[in-house]
């Protein structure tokens, strides 16, 4: 049974759960309610996309899920433990690849392992295996500045995979890339996540990216964020060309449904 079928039958265990999450910031002169109430669960092997209009609170929710921000209300659990003390189970990847410019590709991939005190020879072995598997052989000693944007994002995903987190979190990971590279990277990263048997949460404003990569798409309202809809995506994606996938009538049907769910910003409505 594939991951999606398992999810639908409810057989795959829940790896992450957000319960009644609300976030209000102090703000300069008055409180800013970014998230009103968000609940969802992520099952093992699943990729869940969270989409919403710009400024609706996606990155805020991402930070709460990553354990970087404590929600004002509710909580997020990974493997049955609050994220604040589940450090190490979650790995993340952001729009900015956050590679250290003075370190080589190899040393960047090893970074997370070093922080977790993995013995150096073992860290090196894991990093080299990832670099070989994901097509950057020959670039081990190159500095990030010598790489294309797509290659840098690939190094960032390897660094995330290196310490073997249960859940991978992605916040607009490809939005700084050109269109063609973005579509190729979406397919690439989806495949890597599936091959490694990881669960993932993808936060994005890009509906096409969500449909191309996720098993389910959660649609947030405008700020303060609440859950407006949840779509199950059933599309044969394996090995398909990203452009062909986007012209599939089923893909376009999902796109139209999610577009209709998305609230438009007041300025252009
Ligand atoms: P998105 O990622 O969906 O574009 P964000 O989560 O970045 O949205 O922001 C949601 C809202 O919360 C915005 O109105 C933003 O200005 C506000 N916000 C985000 N971080 C803070 C903060 N640290 N203090 C005050 N307001 C914030
Ligand atoms: Mg954001």
Image (cartoon, grey):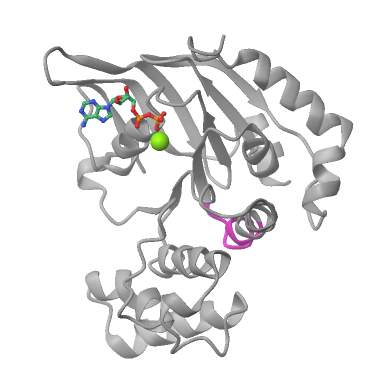
Residue 222 image point, x, y percent: 45, 15
Establish if 148 lies above or below 225.
below
Q: Residue at x 56, y 55 (%)?
A: 177
Residue 71 image point, x, y percent: 23, 27
Q: Does 207 lie within the magenta span?
A: no
Q: Residue at x 38, y 86 (%)?
A: 124
Q: Does 194 lie within the magenta span?
A: yes
Q: Nearer the viewer, residue 221 or 114?
A: 221
143 vs 240, left or right, is: left
Residue 45 image point, x, y percent: 57, 47
Q: Residue at x 48, y 85 (%)?
A: 128
Quadrant placement of the C terminus: top right
102 vs 210, left or right, is: left
Magenta residues, as a range? 191-198
Establish if 71 lies above or below 7.
above
Establish if 133 lies above or below 242.
below
State whether the magenta stretch is mostly helix, strand or loop: helix
Where ligand 1 lies, by quadrant?
top left
Residue 111 image point, x, y percent: 31, 73
Establish if 128 lies above or below 3.
below
Q: Quadrant of residue 137?
A: bottom right
Q: Quadrant of residue 36?
A: top left
147 vs 24, left or right, is: right
Q: Nearer the viewer, residue 5 or 187?
A: 187
**Extreme residue toward the front, this view:** 267
Tell me how many marks there are: 0
Q: Residue at x 37, y 35 (%)?
A: 59
């Amino acid at each position: 049974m594939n991951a999606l079928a398992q999810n639908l039958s409810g057989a795959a265990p829940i790896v992450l759960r957000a319960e009644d999450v609300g976030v209000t910031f102090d703000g300069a002169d008055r409180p800013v309610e970014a998230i009103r109430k968000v609940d969802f669960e992520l099952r093992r092997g699943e990729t869940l996309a969270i989409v919403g209009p710009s400024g609706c609170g996606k990155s805020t929710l991402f930070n709460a899920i990553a354990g970087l921000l404590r929600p004002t209300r509710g909580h997020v659990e990974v493997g049955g433990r609050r994220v604040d003390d589940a450090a190490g189970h979650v790995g993340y990847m952001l729009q900015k690849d956050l590679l250290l410019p003075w370190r080589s590709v190899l040393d960047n991939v090893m970074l997370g392992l070093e922080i977790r005190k993995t013995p150096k020879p073992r860290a090196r072995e894991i990093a080299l295996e990832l670099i070989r598997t994901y097509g950057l052989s020959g670039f081990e000693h190159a500095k990030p500045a010598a790489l294309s944007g797509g290659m840098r994002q690939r190094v960032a995903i390897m660094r995330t995979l290196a310490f073997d987190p249960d859940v991978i979190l992605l916040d607009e990971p490809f939005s700084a890339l050109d269109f063609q590279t973005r579509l190729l990277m979406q397919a690439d990263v989806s495949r890597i996540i599936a091959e490694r048997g990881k669960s993932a949460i993808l936060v994005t404003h890009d509906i096409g990216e969500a449909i191309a990569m996720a098993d389910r798409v959660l649609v947030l309202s405008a700020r303060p964020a609440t859950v407006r809809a949840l779509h199950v995506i059933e599309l044969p994606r394996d090995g398909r060309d990203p452009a062909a996938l986007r012209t599939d009538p089923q893909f376009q049907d999902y796109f139209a449904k999610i577009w209709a769910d998305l609230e438009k910003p007041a300025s252009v409505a």
